[in-house]
Image (cartoon, helix red, strand yellow):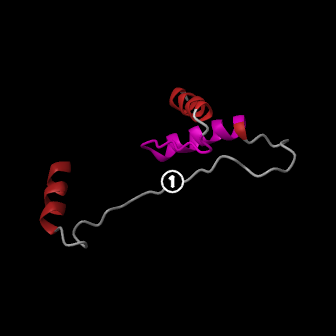
Amino acid sequence: MVAGAFALRHAAQHGKRRVVLAVPFISITEQNAAVYQDLLDPEDAGGGSAVVLEHHIAMDFDLEGAGFGELAEEQSEALR
């Protein structure tokens, strides 16, 4: 939340219309988005459009299928 507060204040001071926050885990993204939605997209806003957009994706890299067989093997061995 501290980073978000800084980003919002910085955007307001410099006349910016958008703030992008990136966090490393989906669960953190969902938690942060819920807090920002509660603060910035209240349900009783009078039918206006939402200002918070939540986006996340879970990536599963197929190193072997992408032609990185040796790297995939090294990664598998490192995880054991």
Left or right: 80 in relation to 4? left
Between residue 56 and residue 2, name the one nearer to us: 2
Q: Report crowding for label 1: few under 14, some 14 to 19, many 20 or more residues within 10 A (C-alpha).
A: few
Instruction: Please give the name of the residue rendered at 44% of the width and 44% of the height, measured from the top-left corner.
Output: 25
Residue 74 % position (x, y): 13, 57
Q: Pinpoint residue 64: horizontal percent, then vertical percent.
A: 21, 69
Identify residue for label 1.
Answer: 56
Q: Residue at x 42, y 43 (%)?
A: 24
> Which residue corresponds to the image point at 19% horizontal and 62% vertical from the top-left?
72
Is residue 80 visible to us here? Answer: no
Q: Is residue 15 above or below residue 71?
A: above
Give percent across and percent down for residue 19: 56, 42
> Is residue 77 inside the magenta stretch?
no
Does the magenta segment cover residue 30? Answer: yes
The residue lying at 39 percent from left, 59 percent from top is 59
Could you say which quadrant of the image residue 73 lies in? bottom left
- Region of the chain picked out in magenta, as a range: 16-39
